[in-house]
Amino acid sequence: MSRVFSGVQPTGNLHLGNYLGAIRHFVPLQDSHDCIYCVVDLHAITQWQDPAELRANTREVTAAYLAAGIDPKRAIIFNQSQVPEHSELAWIFNCVARLGWLNRMTQFKDKAGKDREKASAGLYVYPNLMAADILVYKATHVPVGEDQKQHLELTRDIAQKFNHDFGVEFFPLIEPLIMGDATRVMSLRDGAKKMSKSDPSDMSRITMTDDDDALAKKIRKAKTDPEPLPGPEVLDAAGKVADEARKARPEAYNLLGIYGALAEKELSTVLTEMEGQPFSSFKQQLADLAIATLGPIGGEMKRLMADPGAVDAVLRDGAERARERAGPILKECQDIVGFLRP
Ligand code: AQP
């Protein structure tokens, strides 16, 4: 059975993009794969985190996994810092990856901003730790949002260089699993920017714990344009919206994509249903749908977060099972590198 690994950072404000781009896809994979889902707290501290909030956010992501339908008996759920094999393999990868490769990573440029000198060294080598997260389990399939594609390519490069340098076929070459239409959910305030935890405006994102009123309000106030909704004629032969059409109406296509993802309908179907409608009536339907689909998940998350002991027990059990898998792979890797294990 092939192995899946993915992770979400406990950096607060877990949002619809994290859900539609990643967490939602984790659930059905449990039926066909050996699944390992991590709360990546080591990644989170590449930028400043308040310690008490980090602990609370770690439980929040765990609660989101559980509320979305991940079964902790079948899949492994744990937090990264409790499985030290991740950091140990990451150090080896720091010595495999080339500076030139890291210099090309757009996420570092985005997150470091203008004052790169002040970014942490951890933020710079983040992709090496991400490669270690995946390869310490020899996972082959990685469900992530489209924004993580470049990091997955780097993971392949690291695996390939390691195998080549040491003359082995040890690490597998991974396959990104980027699924569904709404793989990149955009901000509700600016359709050119991705929905993100760190956007200063709470109105830019739908968070997974928003209550019905907040969901309705955020959708009602989402930025739009004055035109009625387009119909299926905007789709090209491959069933996609051409880049130019999307650029002309980014907010409209973002909301239509969200609707399709939540309703589990193809974009062509959504366009046929909504063609010619004004945003006011479409937004009402989207708000009703969001309340029906996301509301119960948010409610279950709140219930779980009120019982931290139960959430922690899931993480403890998961870390133990994760170490059972990662330990032998790391040891074999150390033998290949030439570390003496007396
Ligand atoms: N807007 C998005 N659309 C689709 N997928 C998204 N993901 C994140 N934003 C979107 C996917 O969510 C998973 C977990 O992401 P992460 O916790 O590692 O955080 P991130 O990728 O850095 O993005 P965030 O949540 O928006 O945080 P900030 O504000 O810090 O950049 C990943 O699979 C990611 O692809």
Image (tube, rainbow, N blue to C red):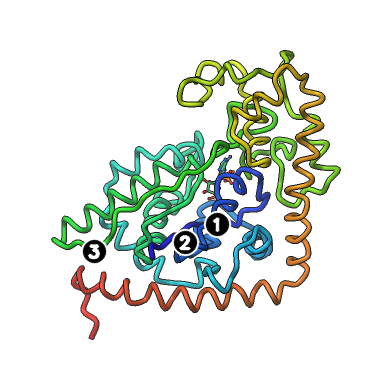
Q: CA distance from mark 1 to mark 3?
A: 28 Å
Query: For residue 229, which quarter of the picture?
Result: top right
Q: What is the three-letter code of the residue carrying label 3?
A: Phe
Q: Is residue 80 rendered to the left or right of residue 259?
A: left
Residue with the mark numbered 1: 28
Q: Earlier in the sequence, mark 1 or mark 3?
A: 1
Q: Secondary structure at mark 3?
A: loop
- Report if the CB atoms under discs 1 and 2 are less than 8 Å apart: yes
User: Can residue 247 be seen?
Assistant: no
The residue positioned farthest toward the left in the image shown: 167
Residue 86 placement (x, y as % from top left): 41, 66
Q: Depth-wise, is mark 2 or mark 3 nearer the camera?
A: 2
Residue with the mark numbered 3: 170
Q: What is the three-letter code of the residue carrying label 2?
A: Ser
Q: What is the three-letter code of the residue carrying label 1?
A: Pro
Residue with the mark numbered 2: 32
Q: Residue at x 58, y 26 (%)?
A: 192
Up/down of 245 relative to 112, above or below:
above
Cβ of disc 3 within 8 Å of ligand 1? no
